[in-house]
Image (cartoon, rainbow, N blue to C red):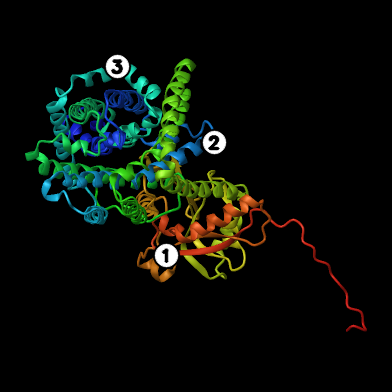
Amino acid sequence: MSKHVNKVTAAGLIVALGIIYGDIGTSPLYVFDEIIHDKIIDELLIVGSLSCIIWTLTLQTTLKYVMLTLQADNKGEGGIFSLYTLVRRQKKWLVIPAMLGGAALLADGMITPPISVASAIEGLRIRPAFADIQQSTIIYIVLGILVVLFFMQQFGTASIGKLFGPIMLLWFLMLAALGISHITDSLDVFKAFNPYYAVKLLSQYPKGFWLLGAVFLCTTGAEALYSDLGHCGKGNIRISWIFVKSCLILTYLGQAAWLLKNHTGQISHAKTFYGVMPDWFQIPGIIIATSAAIIASQALISGSFTLISEAIRLNLWPKMKINYPSEAKGQLYIPGINTLLFSGCCFIVIYFQTSGAMGAAYGLAITLCMLATTILFSNYMVSRRVPAILIYSFLGVFLTIEVGFLIANLDKFPHGGYIALLVGGALFAVMYIWYRARKIKNRYVEFVRLEEYISKLEELSSDTTVPKYATHLVYLTSANYPKEIEHKIIYSILSGKPKRADIYWFVHVDTLDDPYTCEYHVEHIIPNDIIRVEFRLGFRVAPRLNLMFKKVVEDLVANREVNVTSRYESQQRNNVVGDFQFIVMEKFLSQDNELPFMERIIMKLYFWIKEISLSEEKGFGLIQSNVQVEKFPLIVAPVSKMKLTRIYMDDEEE
């Protein structure tokens, strides 16, 4: 991350408002409506709920994320997978909470846009002219906005992104102004700063504990504070959060005071957020709210693209096509994920239809992500040698809070929460299958000492009786050590019809825990004959091997370390550069395997997913015209016992 991002500047604060706070900033649209739904309004319900909101924002968002988790930056980058890379070498099982958190974030990405946009559009009903508007009409409007939003993703957000900050600044100022205008409606709301009223609500109000499921919606965007650390810097996030939290608490105070003044003793079906608006401001308010909801959705969609690209580089997700619509750092577009999110959002809108029904399903998945972050961050604290008493205190406080929220959110399961869990579970299953299958395969990958085959490769390269396969033959190798090579590569070169080349290149890609490292190392095993190139790329760097390898060759030629001129006499006289042929080894599951039942299922699912995902050559950014794919059987557990008996035919039978 560039140093200027760490500096607190006016521009940095505005950018933070536009990128980070869309989700948590639009929560006032629906939080109180979810809390008071079909309940009789009284002081304990309103003041107790408000106290829960204030202390949730204080403990969960401010203390856990803004003050503590932001400390765990990976070269300035944040997010569940950045945190995982900081601790993954400590314990192997930490990959499970990382995958769980990533899947939960993606599942959340299918509910946030519909609930935010629907809550904003439903404000039209507050106007007499639109009081009788059909729900189907609102659904069409929401779907129309989502269509435009997801269609625009392919063009990038570099230009319109500049508008996000000022619009969100206007949004938060509007929240503060609306809150201040109604605080004096009931000064009892100031009691909410005393946590006693939160405890009283949970312990004395009928089914008060289950209200935590609705209260939790006020902090669902807290994970974005950490995920977007690299875009804004922790200084800008922490300073801007003071402003954002103040605006949020002011608007919640105003909504609570308005409810106590106007709805005490009634069963409320009011749209609280729009109820606090003066009549003359309702249309502008709806427009600003819809803009804020769209920005919240955009930030979450962009975050999903980044999340998947990190998972691909960490080998936790199948390779997918990634486009780069602009030169902006971190700006990427994944068509497959865009389609997945769009389909999920449309399904949510059509299935639930109202923001109230969506709220019944919202929050369950994201609690799992927060629990995963708590587990990973506690291990980060261990790696930094934080005193044990502080680590256990952190775990005790936040596991208690988040497990409480999780249990309360489980009440939403039969009302639609099962959909979020099904989506999150399916995404987690893809990650787990991809990760577990690689572990199974790696148990049976055979490496050999390269030095044992150097003389054979040299002989083949000089043997003019063998037709030349290519001037430069390039293999992608997974061998981490330069002195080793996969047996399958040696077999590909030497066995059957040998592949003679003037220079053999072995290219290895090492994914580093640092996010943006981009460097390479060259080892001349035999000068101008056998060369190994190792790319050391951060987990946020796209492996565009075709361009990267071309740059390496240009550097080597400039340094006179290699001669890439064609060895054919006619072409050599004219200094024609020799051809480069890439060989990609693609596995298929052999029938000659004896695997345990579960591993057999995992491997079958792995190859099915692999079949519909991006190919190896496209995943590494190789041009297809100079790439050949060789398929070979993957025998991870060869059949050990084969009952086959020879029989002899006697003369009579013959």
Q: Which numbered disc, 2 or 1, marks the residue closer to the eye?
A: 2
Residue 80, percent across and down? 40, 36
* Residue nearest the viewer, comparing 168 with 451: 168
Q: Residue at the spot x=92%, y=79% of the render?
A: 650
Under mark 3, the amino acid is: Asn
Residue 78 at x, y percent in the picture:
35, 34
Q: Residue at x 61, y 49 (%)?
A: 447
The answer for how far apart the CA atoms under marks 2 and 3 are is 43 Å
Q: Which residue type does callout 1 highlight?
A: Asn
Residue at x 24%, y 44% (from the top left corner): 119
Q: Nearer the viewer, residue 494 or 634?
A: 634
Is 543 left, or right, of 153 in this rendering?
Answer: right
Q: Label 2 amino acid? A: Lys
Q: Quadrant of the N terminus?
A: top left
Counting residues from the N terminus, which is met first, the one under dot 2 or under dot 1?
2
Quadrant of res 340? bottom left
